[in-house]
Amino acid sequence: MIGRTILRVVGPLAPCVVIVVAAWWLALEAFGISPLVGKRPPQVWEYLTSSQEHREAVFGALGITVRDAAIGFTSGMVAAMAVAVTFVLFRTVEQTFMPVAMLLRSVPLVVMTPLITLVFGRDLPGVAVIGGIVVFFPALVNIVFGLRSASPQATDLVLAYGGTRMTVLRKVAVPTAMPSVFASARISVPASIIGALIAEWLATGEGIGAEILRAIGGFRYDEVWADIVVVTTVSILAYAVVGVVESLVLARFSDRPGTGG
């Protein structure tokens, strides 16, 4: 089952990757971009495979970026789920704070980053806030929608048997919201990497984001392209992993009695 799930999720990504690589190569050739600036796939491959020093530089920075993205993803998703549950349980809280959340969402993160850095510092707390903000708002909207999609009939049945609002939440709303939670996770995985890069560009000075800036300043364009390719590949793989986990978890939920399996 796991093998089929992986194949079903990852299979469609393979031709997409081939198309993207071909489009990258053809675009550089079509616009006449010099190989000194616009690196082709073979040049990036050669850069990564020809020197241990190159690999250590790229993958060392990548490890920091993955860590930063994981912190942002986790903090954003946990906060979104906690706030979504609060909104569903207490409608007045939602009516008060949801407009504020949507207003804050409209403020560009680049504008907020200096203030976040000033308040939380340039270390992991600042990274968690910057990455968490990128993840939080889209996830909040999706999860609230999912929790509110619970069947009225199932809700009434639980209440009729003496269940509380928390029982309804646990037995009905949360299982119903699982597709929305995973949809949020799929969106948030690439977003958390973007948040990590923004934090590295503007705050921490570490990771792939900072390495790209330093490489551009030093005219090391092969390193720039290698960094971009590697972080993009990781983003695609993380997206695929979430898709596999989603398929396995939702299949497990659908097999449980009372969940439509």
Image (cartoon, rainbow, N blue to C red):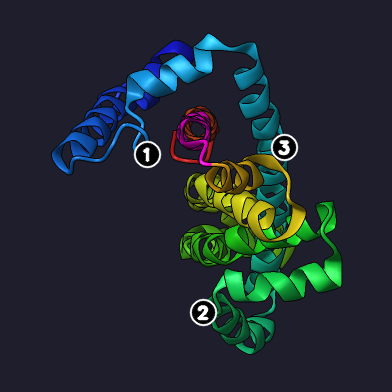
259 relative to 65 in the view: left or right: left
Q: Position of residue 141 (x, y in %)?
A: 52, 67
Query: What main secondary structure does the magenta stretch of the protein show?
Result: helix
- The disc, 3 or 2, on the residue closer to the chain's N-terminal end is 3
- Residue appearing at x 44%, y 33% in the figure: 261
Of the two numbered discs 3 and 1 on the same chain, state the one appearing first in sequence.
1
Q: Residue at x 54, y 74 (%)?
A: 108
Q: Write down the quadrant of residue 126 in the picture.
A: bottom right
Which residue corresponds to mark 3?
A: 64
Q: Amino acid at mark 3?
A: Ile
Picture coordinates of residue 85, whole percent (x, y): 67, 65
- Nearer to us: label 2 or label 1: 1
Out of 70 and 150, give the one closest to the viewer.
70
**Residue type of the residue flagged with mark 1:** Val
Q: Is residue 240 above or below residue 123?
A: above
Q: Which residue is mark 1?
A: 37
Q: Secondary structure at mark 3?
A: helix
Q: Is residue 157 above or below residue 4?
A: below
Residue 126 seen by the camera: yes
Residue 236 placement, left or right of 208? left
Q: Could you say which is closer to the camera, residue 123 or residue 27?
A: 27
Q: Looking at the image, which residue sits at the far left?
A: 30
On whether residue 213 falls in the magenta region, the answer is no
Residue 199 at what x, y percent from top left? 68, 56
Q: Which residues, given as a range, are shown in magenta?
A: 219-241
Amino acid type at image mark 2: Ser
**Earlier sequence position, callout 2 versus callout 1:** 1
- In the rendered view of the protein, which quadrant contains the N terminus? top left
Q: Quadrant of residue 123?
A: bottom right
Q: For mark 2, what is the residue?
A: 106
- 222 inside magenta stretch: yes
